[in-house]
Image (tube, rainbow, N blue to C red):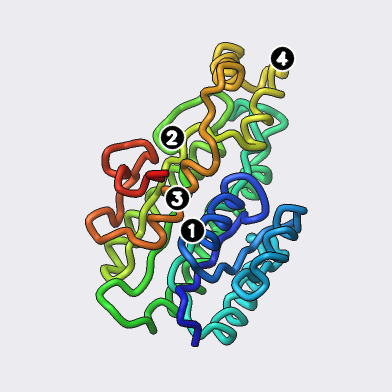
Amino acid sequence: MATQPVFVVTGASKGLGLAVTKLLLEKFGCIVVAIARTRTQEINELSAVHANTLAFIPLDVADAAGFERAVSTARKTYGRIDSLVLNAGIFEPTGKITSEQLEVDAWKQHFDVNFFSQVSALRTVLPCMHMNAGDIKGRVVFVSSGSATGNTFGWAPYNASKAAVNSLCRTLAQEEPDVVAIALRPGRVDTAMQAQIRQLAGTGKMLEEDIAKFVNAHDEGKLVDPMDSGHVIAAMAVNAGKALSGKFVSWDSEEASEFWDSK
């Protein structure tokens, strides 16, 4: 059995997930099972440095059977799973609820990635956590969004899926008192999703005044560095206590301050 804690991180090959993976490896000294659809150059570079503590598995999180096989292999290899960071997600499709381009099938595909993949992940990982000793048998950090409580025009699938994630987190905390579950709002992080939003200008899929807010945040250097909110996620996955379980916490709130990077 591994003596270091073992973490499973989804959406781990770029952006926020990559930052979390890097921090868990290099600051917190963990073993990371990194799951993502694509193997990026950044993951290759991390793998070269952390060959014994980073296991990358190319996988679409919506593939429940594949995810189960990946976790089973990790459990057999390392003997334990301590924490799960559910970061994988998609932003599209966008548009009004009544839009011809936003068919119900598009909603279903969105929820398969942003919500049902997380249900499958929990059903796979929780039995592993139950085998752990201690008062806290495991931790789950759901990467949520301010959209979970928002109403941004054109974002109905994303808003609804993140609200569902928060509800799942609350219910998990109630059902699993020995597992700490936190939904974390990472802020407007400087990732590919922000670029996607800025590119929607003139498409009619969002209100132009809403797009302008995102463009201005980018131009004024106000987007969050992935390493900053990523540090909160990683630190929570390592150390969060039961007092936060079931809560929706913003990365820059007082509740999260103990997990900020002191640098």
Q: Which mark is residue 27?
A: 1
Q: Secondary structure at mark 2?
A: helix
Q: Is residue 207 visible?
A: no
Badge 1 or badge 3: first in the primary sequence: 1
What amino acid is at disc 1?
Answer: Lys
Badge 2 or badge 1: first in the primary sequence: 1
Q: Which residue is mark 4?
A: 202
Q: Say which residue appears at 68% left-offset and 31% top-offset.
A: 196
Q: Are marks 2 and 3 in contact (CB under 8 Å)?
A: no
Q: Which residue is mark 3?
A: 165
Q: Say which residue appears at 27% left-offset and 62% top-offset.
A: 174
Separation (CA) of disc 2 from disc 3: 12 Å
Q: Are marks 1 and 3 in contact (CB under 8 Å)?
A: no
Q: Which residue is mark 2?
A: 146
Residue most extreme to the front? 263
Badge 2 or badge 3: first in the primary sequence: 2
Nearer to us: label 1 or label 4: 1
Badge 4 or badge 3: first in the primary sequence: 3
- Residue 241 point in image, percent of width and height: 27, 60
Separation (CA) of disc 1 from disc 4: 43 Å
What amino acid is at disc 4?
Answer: Gly
Q: Secondary structure at mark 4?
A: loop
Mark 3, residues whose alpha carbon is within 10 Å: few (<14), some, or many (≥20)?
many
Residue 98 to residue 164: above or below: above
